[in-house]
Image (spheres, rainbow, N blue to C red):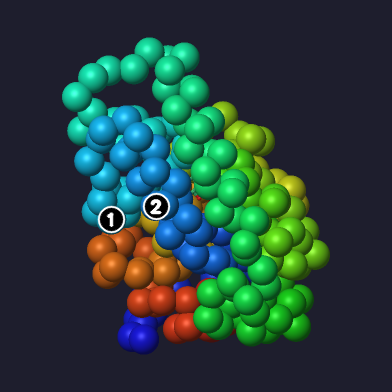
Amino acid sequence: MSSCVKTPVHSPIRYAIFDLDGVITDTAKFHYLAWKRLADEIGVPFDEDVNERLRGVDRLASLRIVLERSPRTYSAEEQQALAERKNGYYRELIQTITPADLLPGIPELLQALRERGIPMALASASKNAPDVITRLGISGWFSAVVDAAKITRGKPDPEIFLAAAKLLDAPPQQCVVVEDAQAGIDAAKRAGMRAVAVNWRGRLEGADASSQGTQGLTVDMLLGT
Ligand code: BG6
Ligand code: MG
């Protein structure tokens, strides 16, 4: 894993906010399978490249991206029904999640941050986030959890990270966000926070530090020290 750290811009960092999907655990594979099943049923081409565009994007906005290749249009009610159908498929798949599904390096990183006394929050575009972190056995690690059900505007709007900071009682400039989506990096910067990218495909831009995967994440990288 390669990584790079740019000059710190928002030190001292005293709080950490984590995205869930693609940072704590790899749910992208389940989202892929669920969207693929739906797309096959309605005759829409769907592949890994389209799935990559769905990282960090909320459910209905994701559906609109999936439907870009649809031969027909869908009413708002039909879109709602399609999104719910996909979510049913996704929920079947996440029943298999266990603590073994934490991404490499994440348990050690959370432990190290706790030992440094860094309060942590989770900020996820997924309405399934509370269920997923329960299955991962990590609910107790976070002082606050903000999911899509608690906000009105999705990433790249900064609302979700500002809400997490508020729950932590933290000034935004003392927060670091760990993200695997461009929309999430953009949201963190718009919130005035330090942004660390989990850059699985090497395409993310604008972060203060970057790691090719979760294994390369370190406390120093997060804190900018
Ligand atoms: C994000 C994922 O965390 O949550 C997206 O990166 C997903 O791919 C979004 O579409 C919404 O998830 P859910 O569970 O509310 O459908
Ligand atoms: Mg993500």
Q: Amino acid at mark 2?
A: Tyr
The answer as to whether callout 1 falls within 8 Å of ligand 1 is no
> Which residue is labeled 1 in the image?
48
The residue most toward the right is 140
Which residue is identified by label 2? 32
Q: Position of residue 44 (x, y in %)?
A: 25, 35
Q: Residue at x 44, y 46 (%)?
A: 34
As drawn, 154 above or below 197: above
Q: Is residue 165 visible to us here?
A: no
How crowded pointer 1 is (Cα within 10 Å; few <14, some 14-19, many 20+) is rated as few
Q: Would you say the residues marked 2 and 1 are in contact, meaning their CB atoms lie under 8 Å apart?
A: yes
Count of marks overlaid on the render: 2
Position of residue 178 measured from the top left corner of the image (x, y, whole percent): 51, 64
| Residue sitting nearer the eye, 206 or 66 | 66
> What residue lies at 45% left-to-right and 50% top-to-bottom?
31
178 is higher (above) or lower (below) than 75:
below
Secondary structure under the numbered disc 1 in the rendered image: helix
Tell me the amino acid under the disc marked 1.
Answer: Glu
Left or right: 224 in relation to 169: left
Q: Is residue 109 visible?
A: yes
Q: Locate the N terminus by quadrant.
A: bottom left
Residue sitting farthest toward the front? 41
Q: Position of residue 181 (x, y in %)?
A: 39, 56
Seen from the viewer's position, the closer of residues 121 and 171 is 121
Q: CA distance from mark 2 to mark 1?
A: 7 Å
Q: Nearer the viewer, residue 15 or 141?
A: 141
Q: Is 107 located above or below residue 31 in the figure? A: below
Query: What residue is rendered at 39% in x and 52% in y?
Result: 32
Dot 2 lies on which element? helix
User: Image quadrant of residue 93?
Assistant: bottom right
Crowding at mark 2 (Cα within 10 Å: few <14, some 14-19, many 20+): some
Of residues 75 and 120, which is closer to you in this image?
A: 75
